[in-house]
Amino acid sequence: MEADKLYKEVYVTMNPFHVAFIKSLLESEGIDFIIEGENFLQIRPLAVPARIKVESSQFEQAIQLLEEFRNDHSEGGIK
């Protein structure tokens, strides 16, 4: 994460498949993101969720992109 950028949380999940799919969606749209806790999903599943954060200026774009995904998958949560 670059020091001069601010990131806002857009999705929290304990499902590694959701993480992979959301990464693909964000990358395809050129949205700058970071994922906190992604590695813990493999080391200690169900202990620490992955938190997907996007660069704050792209927050609204990311929320719109994830709306359809959220409607189809209720386990995670868009902020």
Image (cartoon, rainbow, N blue to C red):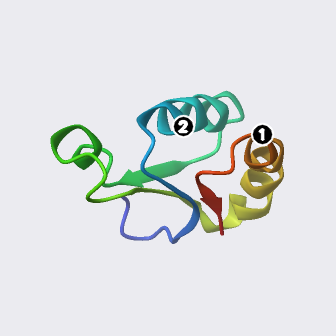
Above or below 19: residue 9: below
37 on left or right of 15: left
Above or below 3: residue 51: above
Within the image, what quadrant is residue 10 found in? bottom right
In terms of depth relative to the viewer, which is nearer, 60 or 52? 52
Looking at the picture, how far across and down is residue 40, in whole percent?
23, 48
46 on left or right of 6: left
Q: Which residue carries the number 2 mark?
A: 18
Q: Which disc, if any, is residue 53?
A: none
The three-letter code of the residue at mark 2 reads: His
**Tag 1 and tag 2, C-beta contact below 8 Å:** no
Residue at x 23%, y 37% (from the top left corner): 42
Residue at x 79%, y 54% (from the top left corner): 61
Q: Which disc, if any, is residue 72?
A: 1
Q: Quadrant of the N terminus?
A: bottom left
Q: Earlier in the sequence, mark 1 or mark 2?
A: 2
Distance in Å between CA atoms under marks 1 and 2: 11 Å
In terms of depth relative to the viewer, which is nearer, 77 or 10? 77
The three-letter code of the residue at mark 1 reads: Asp
In terms of depth relative to the viewer, which is nearer, 65 or 76? 76
Looking at the picture, how far across and down is residue 79, in whole percent?
66, 69
Residue at x 58%, y 30% (from the top left corner): 21
41 on left or right of 71: left
Q: Of the residues tagged 1 and 2, which is closer to the observer?
A: 1
In terms of depth relative to the viewer, which is nearer, 43 or 25? 43
Residue at x 29%, y 44% (from the top left corner): 41
Looking at the picture, how far across and down is residue 17, in whole percent?
49, 31
Q: Secondary structure at mark 2?
A: helix
